[in-house]
Amino acid sequence: MTSHRKFWWLAGSLVCVLGAPAGAAEHTVHMLNTSKTGQGNMVFEPAFLKVAVGDTVVFKPTDKGGHNSVSTFLPPGAKAWKSGTDAELKVVIEKEGVYLYECFPHRVMAMVGVIQAGKPTNLADAKAAADKAKTAFAMNKDRLDKALSQVQ
Ligand SMILES: [Cu+2]
C-alpha cells in the first residue's frame, strides 16, 4: 500500500469509529420458521430483548417464511414500525419503555416479541395491550406472557 493510500484507509477507519454514537449497540432478532431453542414454529428469536435507549434492533428474515415485524404497542412518543414481507428492518429505539410487536401474517400463531429499553415505565399499559393481543392467538398462547415476564 502506498503511503497516500494508507492515509485514506486510516481516514476511512476513523470515520467508521467516530460515526457510531458512543455506546450504541446493535441487536439482531431473527425471524424463523422453526425456533432454534424449542419454542415451536413461527418465532422471533430472541422473543425478549433488553436494550439501551439509542440502540438499534435489526429484524432479520433469517428464514423466508412470509414474515414481517410490525410494532403493536409503544412507549409514548415512540415511532411505529412495519417491515416489508421477508425484508430486513433496522429500528433505532429512541424512547424508554416496553415495546410489543408481531409478525402480522403469523399473529394467530403468536409470532410476537417484546423489547425493553431502559426502565419499564409503561409496563402496566403494555400488559393491558398484551391481554388484548392474546385474544387473537389460536396457538402458543403463553408466548407473549413468557416474553413479558422477562421485563424487569
Ligand atoms: Cu411470521
Image (cartoon, rainbow, N blue to C red):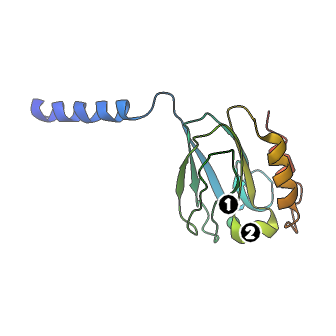
Residue designated by label 2: 106
Whether the residue carrying mark 2 lies under 8 Å from ligand 1 is answered with: yes
Kindly identify the residue that appears in the image at 58 percent across and 69 percent down: 85
Q: Position of residue 5 (x, y in %)?
A: 14, 36
- Do we see residue 2 in this rendering? no
- Residue that lies at the very extreme toward the front in this rendered image: 77
Dot 1: element: strand
- Do we see residue 19 in this rendering? yes
Quadrant in which residue 59 is drawn: bottom right
User: Is residue 19 found left or right of 141 in the rendered image?
Assistant: left
Q: Position of residue 28 (x, y in %)?
A: 59, 47
Quadrant in which residue 44 is drawn: bottom right
Q: Dot 2: few (<14), some (14–19), or many (≥20) neighbours within 10 Å?
A: some
Name the mark nearer the viewer: 1 or 2: 2
Label placed on residue 32: 1
Foreground pick, 38 / 18: 18
